[in-house]
Image (spheres, coloured by chain):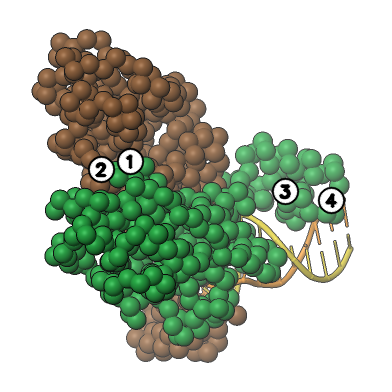
Chain colours: A green, B brown, C yellow, D orange
Amino acid sequence: MRTTIKDIAAACHVSAGTVDRALNNRPGISEKTRKKVLDAAAEMNYQPDFTARSLVMGRTLTLGVVLFDLYNRSFAQLMNAIEKRARELGYFVYITLTDKNAQNERTCIDYLINRKVDGIILFSVNKGKEFETYLNKLHTPVVTIFNYISSDLEYIGIQERQAMKDAVDYVASKRYSRFIYVSPPLAYSGKSNIYTQEERFQGFLEGIQGHKAADPLVLKGADYLEKLMAYPFNKAEKTAVVCSTDLYALEVMNTLKGIGIAIPGEAGVMGFDDIDMLKYISPRLTTVKYPIVQIGEKAVESLVHKIEQGAFKSVPLLGHEIIKGESI
Amino acid sequence: MRTTIKDIAAACHVSAGTVDRALNNRPGISEKTRKKVLDAAAEMNYQPDFTARSLVMGRTLTLGVVLFDLYNRSFAQLMNAIEKRARELGYFVYITLTDKNAQNERTCIDYLINRKVDGIILFSVNKGKEFETYLNKLHTPVVTIFNYISSDLEYIGIQERQAMKDAVDYVASKRYSRFIYVSPPLAYSGKSNIYTQEERFQGFLEGIQGHKAADPLVLKGADYLEKLMAYPFNKAEKTAVVCSTDLYALEVMNTLKGIGIAIPGEAGVMGFDDIDMLKYISPRLTTVKYPIVQIGEKAVESLVHKIEQGAFKSVPLLGHEIIKGESI
DNA sequence: GTGAAAGCGCTAACAA
DNA sequence: TTGTTAGCGCTTTCAC
């Protein structure tokens, strides 16, 4: 059996309370007994049982993360940052993946609550009043990232809309007269929380409004590549394909290359995310970069602040930057 | 306050024991009271407290994963697979990232133990007798992946050596007369557990032995790209650059492109891992594919089998396959 | 079939 | 300064 506080108490001929005082640096104990207990604990290789501690304290020193999956590079980087910062602050991390399934997401959150996590970092596909109420009744702090849910909930992210608008401005400065917007998730509009995608789309619309371009072709849904192949690209009127994430942009580039459209000669491609793999891909994708690692870190910090100090450390929307590649 | 078993007991005028019997489908309770309790529980929105249950049962239904980081694509895919399978089997997953720091890794394992995880999936940088003893004293099942530690510990992986040997055979079939091997982690030989890297290297050595090639240039350490640039590539004697992972292969390709060496004209490049990003990169990297998702799934299944049935579900080394690209 | 009581390992309030 | 006691919410044993 593992050494318990009782074993130490017996070995030192003191009570469990005293052992607790020594072990956890609590006041009201003499240096002498403290040392005696500490020595015994070390010798007996005592390791505290967090399960028991959690039960009595009602805290677990654990954060729950609810994410779609780890396929997207950004998610992996995000998760990495969260785990790192959390452990620096003394917290463990439960990772739960929802596969973008709303029902699944609810189950994940429920389970995290049952396991008494001290806080939750939530990248949600759920949204709406009912869900909001549910979250607020949790009595467990939640910080949302990327997909905004409501102003009642702490949120950390970037100015998605402005970022995409800036991207479009940049594209326009390169004299493109026709625009295609690629964002398959928009097909889930209304059904799922795709706030981030919707904001980017709005930013795109606002962006092209400023420039006298033809009505854009908007590609929502999984068949975007087929639609793209049917599009009449032509050198006289250069077309810019603006994508809501780098992954789509890469697919677009592959497809265009496949049908012999020169990039950026005939068509320009704009991404969003600046995933780290881009450096191996040519032409270098022009994209929007934002501080994904910081988002993870700030989310943890704000959440822990709430847990320990009672209030979130509110974080202003973080900045972004156009990475000028060769694809536009 | 959350509804507890006591609340239900009070509401139903029964004892806590009876509620427990009803809730957990235990025998020794009439259908009538069971229904009454279940109804009350549903109505009162009862959610069991895992912390308390864990304390008394000594089990947490939680698996701990110890990984380097999530930067490598394969790790992210692996983690994704582990979480998915684990939750299918009713387990939650603690993710802990070690940054390849041996000390850190020990701390992670210790903490996981204190939190009473039911099992650990370990991708270790530690190794050696002392570490082995430590792991064996844990009384918590451990399954190791990739970096083999000892035959006393469950291990899931592929035939790394044979896989690299096959890769070299394939390369040789393409009439390369000179070989460079790239594996920066080999610089940590002896210091860190780099079993996987060492096996691949051995496979490489065994591989070229069969083919009358000149002594290979082996690039260990972080300066592999500089060394590569200084290498006298020449068209008459084609050189194959065999890399221990795709990430190095991509760096190599970037560097070679940078100095104007044609691939595969002057130099061939061979990878290992088949990360999913390859499909966006040209020339298509020739590489070795292995079932990373399966490794994650099998690790979970074997571990859970051990936890629940008392014995690991021993898994034979999984297969691999050469993906024929255009880089060799 | 059900209730009462003990206890998992720890913390915290109150006595001494 | 120290010991004692009473839980945290649940499971489990043993009476009845």
Disc 1 packing (10 Å; few <14; some 14–19; many ≥20): some
**For residue B196, side relative to residue A298 (left or right):** left
How many labels were placed on the picture? 4
In contact (CB < 8 Å): disc 1 and disc 2: yes
Quarter of the rendering containing residue B2: bottom right
Q: Which residue is mark 3?
A: A23
Q: Which residue is mark 2?
A: B281
Q: Amino acid at mark 2?
A: Ile
Task: Reply above or below: B161 against A246.
Answer: above
Residue drawn 57% across the image and 51% down it: A85
Which numbered disc, 1 or 4, marks the residue that appears first in the sequence? 4
* Residues flagged by tags 1 and 4 on a common chain: yes
Quarter of the rendering containing residue B229: top left
Task: Reply above or below: B1 against B210.
Answer: below
The picture places residue B61, in percent across and down from the top left corner, at 42, 59
Find residue A42 and name its label. Answer: none
Q: Which residue is mark 1?
A: A280
Real-space Cα distance between discs 1 and 4? 61 Å
The picture places residue A145, in percent across and down from the top left corner, at 49, 66
Task: Reply above or below: A23 against A94.
Answer: above
Disc 3 packing (10 Å; few <14; some 14–19; many ≥20): some
